[in-house]
Image: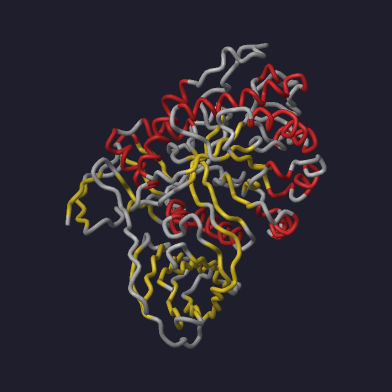
Amino acid sequence: MQWLSFSTMSWTLAIVFVYGDECIPRKFSEESIVCVCNATYCDSVKIKVPKKGSFRRYTSTLSGERLHSRDGVFNTPLKSRVTLLLNPKKKYQTIHGFGGAFTDSAGLNINTLSKPTQQKLMQTYFGPDGSRYNIGRLPIGGSDFSTRGYTLDDVPGDTKLSNFSLAPEDKLYKIPYMRTALALNPQIKFVAAPWTAPPWMKTNNQYIGQHSHLKPEYYQTYANYLIKFLESYKKLGLPMWAMSLGNEPINSYMPFVTINDLAWTPQNQARWLVNNLVPALNQSTSRETHLLGLDDERIVLPWWLDEMYRTADVGKHFIGFGVHWYTNSLTPVTLLDIVHRKYPDKFIICTESSYIPFPWDDVPVRLGSWQRAELYIRNIIEDMNHWVSGWVDWNLALDKSGGPSWIPNPVDSAIIVNPETDEFFKQPIFYTMAHFSKFIPVGSERIGLSSHCEIKSVAFLTPNNETVIVLYNQANKNKTVSIIDPEHGDVNIEMTPRSMETIIYQR
């Protein structure tokens, strides 16, 4: 047992007695709670798989449970139940992992906390008792979540890139926290993504703007620019596992989207890839870095890829495709199935997700919003049931206004920092991600599990021969669920309204 005291500008001092590593809850005006962490304490969960014949369930609820664990035994089905049939012999995609993004804004916000609190925050994401994130996405130069517009060579006409250099933001807000993450999880894989080319290489000479294409005479210069980034980070001991061809290339064609961008058509991007980027990459010291296609909304699938594949040899240069979740509600998930059928040798991974407030909900950050966490779990389960092999969240940490963002473009985040009291708040979204990332290691395989209209579900077999099942009860009432495992018996649980479960057991 240990005691902790927490205070904010709007709360009086309170003494809380805590047993183990439980959540320290704080209620704001939302429907659920955040978990509060500081320099000396942060909730954590150790995964312990019980002996054969038993299972362990980890529960997060609207009422405030956060990965609360309890054990059960296999037994006979219950009456008045939802029945799900498990088929461990039916195998689907292999999992590449889960993670978040090392943006300038994330690093800036983490940097406002004391060193011990910074370490707690990094441990809660990347440590063995934390979320076990194994993917870190990294913008190349500035993004919309920077405090200014910039690239890594903003000297006009510098075709030899003699003025290329990493920015102060790389050194202050990205590299230190990437190194910390690597120390906490040596298996982490970094994925880079460019937002824009230097403005002097573009037709509109701006960081943002409609139809901001790369000038053809700078195709090779831009490829060399990206290679210089890869080699610079590799020299620092931070090699990139993969790099996309560009974040959201369709943004420049949308008048209502104004972020750092570089407009591509799929045809031009394919020619640049084959004629400029791949030859430069193959001649570099970073030739082991893989390439990801698309890195944009699934609304353009499969059209974008089909058009790129019209260029000879495009397919052999991709390891997989990146998709973003922002238009999921507007597009059928079966587009992912079509992509898998057409390009079965490529994996699909969600490379960016964050909650962007709707016009009728103009509050970027809602501390304790359970509804936003539910959007995450619905989308992750749906994507994983349609061949997506991993999910990467956006900013690792933001402030209470959802920034900073120089555009501006405030959004919510899994962790919100509160530097006034040297605390950070773990949002319900944080635990949604953890229901997957903590329990499903790289190399796991999705296995067969039947569906139900109210209980969303997905199942995996891990490299340690463990079964992992993630459930979400979207109903507003209790549901009794029976998962029938033909080899072990039945997992029978009672799920509270709008709750999440991860169940794990030995095969």
Give the vertical position of 211 relative to 63 (above or below).
above
Residue 409 occupies quadrant:
top right
Q: Is residue 47 left or right of residue 472?
A: left
Which residue is at 49% across, 78% downward?
A: 483
Q: Is 257 placed left or right of 487 in the picture?
A: right
Q: Is residue 453 above or below residue 354?
A: below
**Residue 60 at what x, y percent from top left?**
41, 62
In this picture the colour scheme is: secondary structure
Q: Position of residue 271 (x, y in %)?
A: 78, 33
Residue 74 at x, y percent in the picture: 40, 82
Q: Residue at x 79, y 47 (%)?
A: 306
* Camera-nearest residue between 159 and 202: 159
Residue with the most extreme front position = 283
From the viewer's side, name the closer residue of 60 and 390.
390
Please identify the quarter of the rendering in which residue 268 is found. Answer: top right
Going by the image, does 78 lie left or right of 164?
A: left
**Residue sitting at 55 percent across and 33 percent down?**
139
Position of the C terminus by quadrant: bottom left
The residue lying at 60 percent from left, 60 percent from top is 93
Q: Position of residue 188 (x, y in %)?
A: 45, 44
